[in-house]
Image (cartoon, helix red, strand yellow):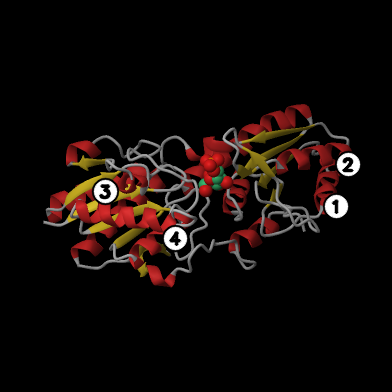
Amino acid sequence: MMKIGICTGGGDCPGLNAAIRAAVKHGIRNHQMEFTGILDSFNGLQDRPMRTIPLKNTDVMDILHRGGTILGTFNRGCCFSGADGDHKLQLTKEGFDELKLDALIVIGGEGTQGMSSQLIQAGIPVIGIPKTIDNDLPGTDTTIGFSSCVDLVADSVHRLRSTAESHDRIMILEVMGRDSGYIALHGGVAGGCNVVLIPEIPFSWDSIISKINFRKKLGRNFSLIVVSEGAVPAGEQTQQFQTTPDGRQVLGGIGQIVGIRLQKETGMETRVTVLGHLQRGGQPNPQDRLLASQMGIHAIDLLAQGLHNQMVIKKGDRITHIPFSDISANSRRKISSDDQLLKAAEGLGICLGR
Ligand code: F6P
């Protein structure tokens, strides 16, 4: 009987539980596998005593629709780097051996899967499942959590439209995404906004101001803007960061800067909404439930065939896999200049700040 450990790492997102459920159900039902849940990313294997829970069919009942992760998670950078990195890697390997696991299923984003590569080098067989609202993991067309996040952004733009139209205002929505603009572009276009600012295209103030003034000339006395947290004005190198209550620097604040400048330059009343962690919470939409379920099933099929060290991916409409060695460590996917949605956005007259 194969014994499989399963964990979630990095920021939470909708669909993690759906992936856990699919893997456990399929593994137990069709391959007589046994599952151990590792708590709080790899921490559960490093801590002594170790922190794990058995995962049986009954433990994954009724979690398909639940946000967050029943296994907990952790997103404070790479735990296998820095002064005690080697020691933590060793503890993780010892924990894995002590539990007599045959492989780990790691559901995570770029940071977590970078750590998975280190585990593979240390001799732990891994199957990766990609998740992140940012959609910035290389190798896959899409990640678990992205679609639900886009739903929320699109709905938020739509809601802001009421105030924008009623009060003749510029309404700005700052969204997450780190150094990639997928959330802003997809959510902004789907929400029908007028300006989308993404990290991949340093933006010109003039182009945004002319767009707003052009709309005013047409009698549209309001504008809706989505700005990605990683966006920067052309000519400036630095992104905006904020300090969390625990003293960490996280991206954020560009929305306010854009708001102040546009209010001054256009004379229009301007308001800024930061969508924040609402983007990571709540139920997965049906698309994410399906993606997570298919990816969980595929991970088990790979293990059942004796395949390891693969990342489950979605290419076109197919769920498939690539070796971990094909993914360059710690690289993040960005919107390419020939992205079709980028072109469609401009076709629709959406200003991308250039
Ligand atoms: O990677 C997911 C993400 O939500 C990013 O979009 C965002 O920059 C970051 O995590 C926020 O992290 P934290 O939850 O630590 O504030």
Label located before the other in sequence (1 or 2)? 1
Amino acid residing under circle 4: Gly
Tell me which residue sits at (43%, 43%) in the image.
74
x and y percent of residue 76 in the render?
49, 46
Label located before the other in sequence (4 or 2)? 4
Q: Looking at the rendered structure, which numbered label has been put on residue 265? A: 2
x and y percent of residue 7 in the render?
33, 48
Q: Is residue 46 shown left or right of residue 278?
A: left
x and y percent of residue 52 in the render?
26, 42
- The residue where tag 1 is placed is 206
Task: Pick out the residue farthest to the bottom.
Answer: 326
Label located before the other in sequence (3 or 1)? 3
Amino acid residing under circle 1: Asp
Q: CA distance from mark 3 to mark 2?
A: 53 Å
- The residue where tag 3 is placed is 22
Label located before the other in sequence (4 or 1)? 4
Tell me which residue sits at (35%, 59%) in the image.
128
Q: CA distance from mark 1 to mark 2?
A: 10 Å
Q: Quadrant of ligand 1?
A: top right
- The residue where tag 4 is placed is 114
* In front of the other: 294 or 280: 280
Label located before the other in sequence (3 or 2)? 3
Q: CA distance from mark 4 to mark 3?
A: 24 Å
